[in-house]
Amino acid sequence: MRSKTPLTGTKRKNAEKLTQGFRGIFIFLFTTSGVINILALTGSFYMLQIYDRALTSGSVPTLLALSALAIGLYLFQGLFDIIRSQVLVRVGARLDSKIAPMAHQVAIDMPRFGFSTAEALERGRDVDTVRGFLGSQGPVALFDLPWMPLYLIFVYMLHPYLGALTFGGAFILSMLTIATELMTRRLASATHQAAIARNAIADSNARNADILKAMGFAGRAVDRFNRANQEHLELQTRTNDISGTFGALSRVLRMVLQSAVLGLGAWLTIQGELSAGAIIAASVASARALAPVDLAIGNWKSVVAARTAFQRLKETVIALSGSEPPMELPAPAGSLKVEKITVAAPGSGRVLLSDVSFEIKAGQALGIIGPSGGGKTTLARALTGIWPTLRGSVRLDDAELTQWSDSNLGQYVGYLPQDVALLDATVEENISRLEPQVDARAIVDAAQTTGIHEMIVRMPDGYRTALGPQGASLSAGQRQRIGLARALYRNPFIVIMDEPNSNLDGEGELALTETIKSIRARGGIAIVIAHRPSALAAVDLVAVIQSGKMVAFGPKDEILKSSVPAEPANRPAPAAQHAPRVTSRVSA
């Protein structure tokens, strides 16, 4: 998901938020790595002094002093290594706490723009990937790599031939690292996409478990998942094969180089150009010089995964960033105006609604009718700001919806979608929209308005009864009425209900009619999308939406009389008999 727009304003700020405050920490880690690498030369100097000074002089005090000094330096190296490791772990935790909320906000927004649930949830996994990488050996290798020249210089100072040999080995290992990157980059991306596709199928199967069981095609669904999983496994295996092969080559080359350094050092010693202590010192230093490259190759898969995950998080935040937060406006109380709006499905770009205009005053209720797939639900999504408009505007008291922040607009809008989804929370939390400070009076008022107070208090824990995932323990009608109570919480100015009576019995429909009347009586606006005429009992305006156009709008009695031959909402026959089947993947 790549943003093609320049980084300006809020987009730039949101992108910078991902790494804001970490520059100083990374400078500290780089400096600490420098200290660790300088102290890592202790072994080479110790060997050099032992062979060339202590052994030749036969001095035990010199040997003890050198050993004590080496042990002290090793302890300091270990201390700094522990500090670096713990700082990296805490950087990962801090980064997680900073970007996890942003990633989850992105996961909430992405489905509105046509992305699958699996793609949206992948952003949360990206956060885990980045945090896990920072706690691994991958960052250690990256912080040690810039200090590799320190060891090359040390070996070169022992003898230019040894320096040239070590530099050549480091160059070959670096080429192996680049080759690993080039050969795994596309495979890593393809593996990630295959994982998303597999997870999307798994998510779809889980959500449709009842259908799969009832109609006996669970086995075929499992086969479909298995095919996607096999594709993912094949790509993952190829990636691991490449990484493993180059990792093995790196280790073998490193051992060959160490032996070559020893052999060359021995030859130079025979020629009288090198001391015996320098042979061991060169071997230890050359091994330390190549260790970061070897470690980087061994952890390259996690390096690529973390880099890709972070880049994906950054691009997604940029792409979905809005403008500066708008100024808070007073509560709307006058009207809802729709001015020539055109709306397209975010996933496909297909226009679903075109040039729709109307106005509703406070205290009025609008019923929207028309054949299935005509654009009624699309209109509801545009009125609530779920889907943006391509052209035109939706205004509350003359202010466009874009002039309201999501949290402020949400106070004045109640929305009951066609497919009611309840949160995995209590009844109380669902109705109150997860408000941290629960207003018990407002919750009970919303429940009483929809006629479900008695139903709720009969539950095991009343308003604090846990509903479980998607409210699975409730009937469809109960979920719909709790969803309606959520829409009415704190008496929002505008309440939009998409087929609110589709799962209601006679008692529920009477409660719905009274609810619409109460919204009008308190000066609010009610919008009802319906196929069954009983839902229109309390409305005074009707609009007919057909083929993405508004073909009629006006007083209820006039519109219903003129629309009787074509309007399914005025006949008891099901809507499916009057409309072609919608084949788009986005429901209109």
Image (spheres, helix red, strand yellow):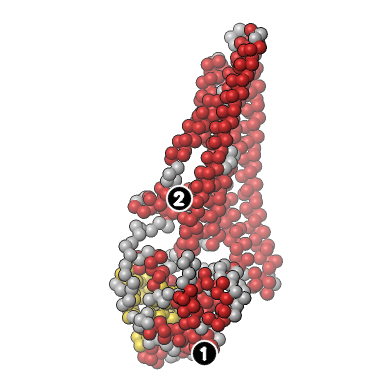
Going 46% across and 76% down the picture, which residue do you hit?
441
Mark 1 — residue? 572
Q: Quadrant of residue 138?
A: top right
Q: Amino acid at mark 1?
A: Pro
Q: Mark 1 Cα within 10 Å, few/some/many (few <14, many 20+)? A: few
**Residue 439 rendering spot, x and y as whole percentages:** 46, 72
Q: Are marks 2 and 1 in contact (CB under 8 Å)?
A: no
Whichever of callouts 2 and 1 sits on the residue coming sooner in the sequence is 2
> Which type of secondary structure does the marked residue at label 2 adopt?
helix
Q: Nearer the viewer, residue 226 or 98?
A: 98
- Going by the numbered disc 2, the residue's amino acid type is Lys
Circle 2 sits on which residue? Answer: 314
Q: Nearer the viewer, residue 44 or 557?
A: 44
Can residue 185 be seen by looking at this rendering? no
Comparing labels 2 and 1, the label whose residue is closer to the camera: 2
Q: Which mark is residue 342?
A: none
**317 sits left or right of 477 in the view:** left
Asked whether the viewer can see residue 234, the reply is yes
Q: Nearer the viewer, residue 328 or 257?
A: 328
